[in-house]
Amino acid sequence: MSHLTFENSPKLGKVANHGALAKRLCDALPVPGKHLSGGVRCTGIGAKGRPITEHAELCHVLNRRLRQGPGRDDAMREGVVDCSYAAVKTALTPQPGDAPVSFSLPVQGIETRMTRTGWPPIPGALRERTN
């Protein structure tokens, strides 16, 4: 199963740039009409088209992308993760010490849905840093 992994080191100024991390994640999620080489780009899918910068909004979009649209039943059968508010907040919270903060999302269900709708597949693993 592929994962989208995003990291941020507390050394870079805590994880105060939640908006940057959220944007990276949204950029990697599939949306029709936003095709890019090697994957897909997703921007402006927050409430009323605003960029996604809030935890709750990020969770809402993740859940919507994973649980609605073509292939929804397949995604549910495959046990695609349910990104709760608490899970994302925990992932974005700075940890003590120098360990980087990371957030990893299984994307098997998304890949299935993309295949069914003719979107280009996400590469085996996408790794992004917020710096």
Image (cartoon, helix red, strand yellow):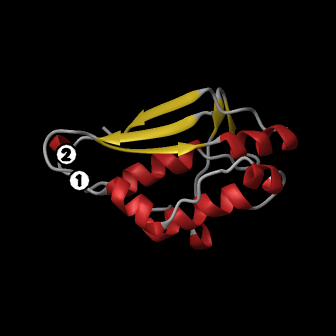
Quadrant in the picture for the N terminus: top right
* Observer able to see residue 83: yes
Q: Nearer the viewer, residue 15 or 34?
A: 15
Q: Nearer the viewer, residue 22 or 86?
A: 86
Q: Quadrant of residue 115?
A: top right
Q: As drawn, which residue projects farthest toward the left?
A: 97
Q: Which residue is mark 1?
A: 94
Instruction: Name above or below for residue 29 compared with residue 44.
Output: above
Side (left or right) of 15 relative to 2: left
Instruction: Name above or below for residue 54 compared with residue 113.
Output: below
**Circle 1: is it few (<14), some (14-19), or many (20+) Cα within 10 Å?**
many
Side (left or right) of 13 relative to 39: left
Q: Nearer the viewer, residue 73 or 6?
A: 73
Residue occupying image coordinates x 72% and y 32%: 121
Contact, CB < 8 Å: mark 2 with mark 1? yes
Q: Quadrant of residue 68?
A: bottom right
Quadrant in the picture for the C terminus: top left
Instruction: Name above or below for residue 109 compared with residue 63.
Output: above
Residue occupying image coordinates x 72% and y 46%: 78
| Label located before the other in sequence (2 or 1) | 2
On the image, the x and y values in percent for residue 124 come to 61, 26
On the image, the x and y values in percent for residue 114 come to 77, 41
Instruction: Name above or below for residue 59 compared with residue 79.
Output: below
On the image, the x and y values in percent for residue 62 come to 59, 58
**Could you give the CA–CA distance between mark 2 and mark 1, rounded to whole angstroms?**
6 Å
Say how many tags the image has.
2
* Observer able to see residue 50: no
Q: Which residue is mark 2?
A: 10
On the image, the x and y values in percent for residue 14 come to 20, 51
